[in-house]
C-alpha cells in the first residue's frame, strides 16, 4: 500500500524511548527527562508581543512564498553582520523551521543515487531526508579521542564521483563538538576542489561556550557552493513557532522555492513578524539563556566525570553532552532502556545518531540544574545495581 519511498525509511530510533517515557508519565511515574531537544525557557516577551500584535492587526493571510521582505532583509543583515556573508534578500528563503529548509535544500540538490556525506554521529533527520530524495547517505566517522572533529582526511576517504553534497552541523547535535576555523577552511578547500555542495546547519550557532561559531560560506568562493541553514528554535526558544531559513545562491533558492510553493506555500504569516522582532530586538535574553546553559553544562560534565569509568568530552556548544558509558554496557539502546526502567531517567541512546555513537548516551541539559542533579543521582544508583 505504501510507497517504496516511505516503506524504506526506518522509524525514528529515538521514538521508542520517548514514547515509553511518555507512557510511564501518563501512569503517574516520576520520570526525569534528560532526552529533550528544546530549550526549557520562555520565548522572550518582545517576540511574543510582536506575534500578538501581528495577529491583532490581521496579519493572517498568505505571505509571499519565500517570506515577507522585512524578514528576508533582517536575515540578510544578520548574516552580513554576524556571519560575514553577503546575501541579498532574494538569496534567502524563510521556512517553517530549519528542518524544512534542510529538506528543501536536499530535495533541490540531490538526484537519485547521488551520495551525500554525513558526519557520524549526526542529527537523526539528515539520513531519512537524503533517502526520501532518492540519494544515498555516506557516513564519515568521528571519534571521542578526536573530540568528535570531522576531519578533512576522513572526508576525502569517502568522496566518489557520485558525491554531491556534504552536511555539516557545528555546533553538533548530538556531540556538542564544534568545527574550528582551521578545520572549516580545510573542508572548504576539499569541497571547492571536488565541486561538492555544503549544507551548513547552523541552528546551534548562538549556543556556544568559548570559541565563536564560524560560517563556512564566509570563506572565499564558498558562498557559491554553500546552503547556510539556520532558524529561531534554539537561540530564541521558539521551537513551536516553526521558523527557519536558508541562504544560498539564487539558482538554488529558486529551486527550493519550487518545492516550497507546492508544499508549504509560506511560513506562518504572524510568526514571520515574530522572527523580525527576534532578529532586530534585544539579544540580552539569548545571552542569559546561553549563560544558564553553560552553568548546567559545567555541572553535568562534573557529575558525569565523577561516575567511575565514564568519559565525557566537554561540549563546546548546543545543550547536549555525549558521555561514553561503554564500560557499563556497550549496547546504548539496552542501557537507555535500563535507565528508563530502573532509574526512571529518559536519555537518548547514542546509536540513534549513527554507528559511531554506540556505547554513548545523549544527555540534554535543557532542563533545570535540580532535575539534572536528580537524574544523575538516579543514574549513578542504577549503575551500581
Ligand atoms: C541539528 C538540528 N538541525 C535542525 C533542527 C531543526 O530545527 P527546527 O526546529 O528549526 O526545525 C534540529 C532540531 O532539533 C537540530 O537538532
Image (tube, rainbow, N blue to C red):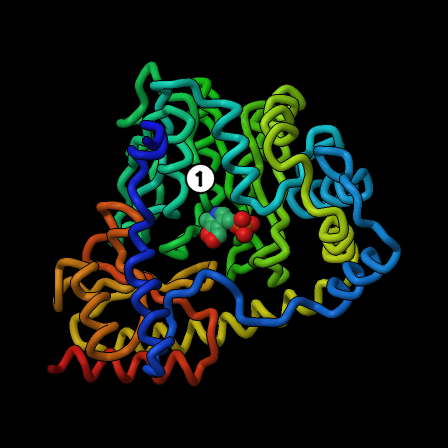
Whether 341 is drawn above or below 361: the answer is below
Q: Which residue is mark 1?
A: 168
Ligand 1 closer than 8 Å to the CB at disc 1?
A: no
Q: Is residue 84 left or right of residue 201?
A: right
Q: Nearer the viewer, residue 235 or 218?
A: 235
Q: Farthest front residue? A: 1
Q: Nearer the viewer, residue 372 or 6?
A: 6
On the image, which quarter does residue 365 sit in? bottom left
Circle 1 crowding by C-alpha within 10 Å: few under 14, some 14–19, many from 20: many
Q: Is residue 265 left or right of residue 331?
A: right
Measuring 37% from the left and 76% from the top, which residue is drawn there?
26
Q: Percent from the top left, x then y, of residue 291?
A: 56, 72
Measuring 35% from the left and 28% from the top, which residue is drawn there?
3
On the image, which quarter does residue 88 sit in? top right
Is residue 299 something that shows in the picture? yes
Measuring 67% from the left and 40% from the top, which residue is drawn there?
94
Is residue 313 something that shows in the picture? no
Measuring 42% from the left and 51% from the top, which residue is drawn there?
172
Whether 326 is drawn above or below 137: the answer is below
Q: Percent from the top left, x then y, of residue 275?
A: 72, 52
Q: Nearer the viewer, residue 165 or 299?
A: 165
Q: Percent from the top left, x then y, of residue 300?
A: 37, 75
Which quarter of the figure is the N terminus placed in?
top left
Whether 3 is drawn above or below 276: the answer is above
Which quarter of the figure is the C terminus placed in?
bottom left
Q: Percent from the top left, x then y, of residue 353?
A: 31, 49
Whether 157 is drawn above or below 271: the answer is above
On the image, which quarter does residue 53 sit in? bottom right
Q: Farthest right residue? A: 57
Amino acid at each position: 500500500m505504501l510507497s517504496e519511498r516511505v516503506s524504506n525509511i526506518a522509524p525514528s530510533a529515538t521514538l521508542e524511548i520517548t514514547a515509553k517515557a511518555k507512557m510511564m508519565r501518563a501512569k503517574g511515574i516520576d520520570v526525569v527527562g534528560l532526552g529533550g531537544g528544546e530549550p526549557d525557557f520562555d520565548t522572550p516577551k518582545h517576540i511574543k508581543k510582536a506575534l500578538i500584535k501581528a495577529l491583532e492587526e490581521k496579519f493572517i493571510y498568505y505571505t509571499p512564498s519565500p517570506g515577507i521582505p522585512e524578514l528576508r532583509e533582517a536575515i540578510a543583515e544578520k548574516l552580513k553582520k554576524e556571519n560575514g556573508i553577503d546575501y541579498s534578500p532574494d538569496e534567502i528563503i524563510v521556512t517553517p523551521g530549519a528542518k524544512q529548509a534542510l529538506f528543501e535544500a536536499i530535495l533541490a540538490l540531490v538526484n537519485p543515487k547521488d551520495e551525500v556525506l554525513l558526519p557520524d554521529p549526526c542529527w537523526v533527520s539528515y539520513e531519512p531526508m537524503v533517502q526520501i530524495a532518492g540519494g544515498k547517505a555516506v557516513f564519515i566517522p568521528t571519534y571521542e579521542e578526536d573530540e568528535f572533529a570531522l576531519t578533512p582526511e576522513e572526508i576525502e576517504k569517502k568522496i566518489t564521483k557520485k558525491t554531491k553534497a556534504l552536511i555539516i552541523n557545528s555546533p553538533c547535535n548530538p556531540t556538542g563538538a564544534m568545527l574550528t576555523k582551521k578545520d572549516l577552511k580545510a573542508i572548504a578547500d576539499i569541497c571547492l576542489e571536488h565541486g561538492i555542495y555544503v549544507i551548513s546547519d547552523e541552528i546551534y550557532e548562538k549556543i556556544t561556550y568559548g570559541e565563536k561559531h564560524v560560517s563556512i560560506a564566509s570563506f572565499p568562493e564558498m558562498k557559491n557552493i554553500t546552503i547556510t541553514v539556520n532558524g529561531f528554535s534554539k537561540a530564541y526558544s521558539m521551537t513551536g513557532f516553526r521558523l527557519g531559513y536558508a541562504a544560498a545562491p539564487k539558482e538554488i533558492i529558486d529551486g527550493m522555492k519550487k518545492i516550497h510553493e507546492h508544499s508549504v506555500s509560506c511560513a506562518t504569516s504572524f510568526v514571520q513578524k515574530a522572527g523580525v522582532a527576534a532578529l532586530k530586538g534585544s539579544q540580552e535574553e539569548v545571552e542569559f539563556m546561553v549563560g544558564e546553559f553553560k552553568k548546567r553544562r559545567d555541572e553535568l560534565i562534573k557529575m558525569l566525570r565523577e561516575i567511575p569509568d565514564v568519559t565525557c568530552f566537554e561540549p563546546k556548544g548546543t545543550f547536549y553532552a555525549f558521555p561514553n558509558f561503554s564500560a557499563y554496557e556497550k549496547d546504548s539502546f539496552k542501557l537507555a532502556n535500563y535507565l528508563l526502567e530502573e532509574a526512571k531517567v529518559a536519555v537518548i541512546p547514542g546509536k540513534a545518531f549513527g554507528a559511531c555513537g554506540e556505547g554513548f548516551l545523549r544527555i540534554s541539559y535543557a532542563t533545570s540544574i535540580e532535575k539534572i542533579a536528580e537524574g544523575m543521582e538516579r543514574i549513578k544508583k542504577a549503575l551500581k545495581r
